[in-house]
Amino acid sequence: KQEVTQIPAALSVPEGENLVLNCSFTDSAIYNLQWFRQDPGKGLTSLLLIQSSQREQTSGRLNASLDKSSGRSTLYIAASQPGDSATYLCAVRGRGSNYKLTFGKGTLLTVNP
Amino acid sequence: DARVTQTPRHKVTEMGQEVTMRCQPILGHNTVFWYRQTMMQGLELLAYFRNRAPLDDSGMPKDRFSAEMPDATLATLKIQPSEPRDSAVYFCASGLGLPGLAGGLNKSGANVLTFGAGSRLTVL
């Protein structure tokens, strides 16, 4: 059974700092990995998706990397801003008949002005 | 701006009552997921539909939960009878062209799920 772990559970940084969020998964036989953002009381917004054959994806100040063999992904946020404050969730889609998304519990990020 | 629409946004009910949550997936999407989010468990998959057929509902308590797609524009999640432990936010998500059992559609760009804003359920 796939398990996804995100560390740290919460992170508080001053504005402008570069930061890294970590995600690890136990079964490396994945189809892809997706990073989401969730604002309080809201749904999930997809940020980046990395296919299993890819090593990284970039969108603006965000860069996500994938090391499938070690079961790890990182989300790098450059020059953080207060508007980046949210919960960031990592989800992996496994190979197999159902292609389920298994989520981590998220990292709550607070960027202080 | 295509979006997944969920109703109701908030529901407070008493234990034992029936609760029905509805989801309108993005037009043209052929996969629908129901997730439940709680502080303790995080996001848990309840049900997965592809082309309106239920492919996986193993995460759903069968004795009280049921999920259906009466047509391509509507997915429902029903709880009967509801219990306080069902209190959570229920999310619906839809996607397009995920590879499945009977061969797949075009893989490129076809894997991003779009989530609705969720239905917050409180069972007293």
Image: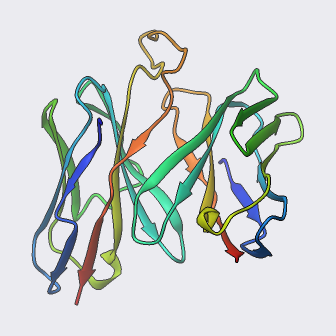
- Residue at horizontal 15%, vertical 34%? B73
Report whether residue A105 is seen: no
- Residue at horizontal 67%, vertical 47%? A2
x and y percent of residue B32 in the render?
32, 38
Report whether residue B32 is seen: yes
x and y percent of residue B82 in the render?
20, 75
Closest to the observer, A35 or A5: A35
x and y percent of residue B64 in the render?
22, 65
Is residue B18 positioned above or below B90 on the image? below
Compared across the picture, whether B122 is left or right of A100 comes to left
Looking at the figure, which quarter contains the C terminus of chain B?
A: bottom left
Compared across the picture, whether A104 is left or right of B20 comes to right
Is residue A96 positioned above or below A88 on the image? above
Is residue A84 positioned above or below B97 on the image? below
- Residue at horizontal 30%, vertical 27%? B29
Looking at the figure, which quarter contains the N terminus of chain B?
A: top left
Is residue B7 positioned above or below A54 on the image? below
Please, which residue is most extreme toward the bottom here?
B124
- Give the colour scheme shown: rainbow
Task: Name the quadrant containing residue B114.
Answer: top left
Task: Name the quadrant containing residue B117.
Answer: bottom left
Q: How many marks?
A: 0
- Residue at horizontal 81%, vertical 38%? A65
x and y percent of residue A8 in the render?
78, 70
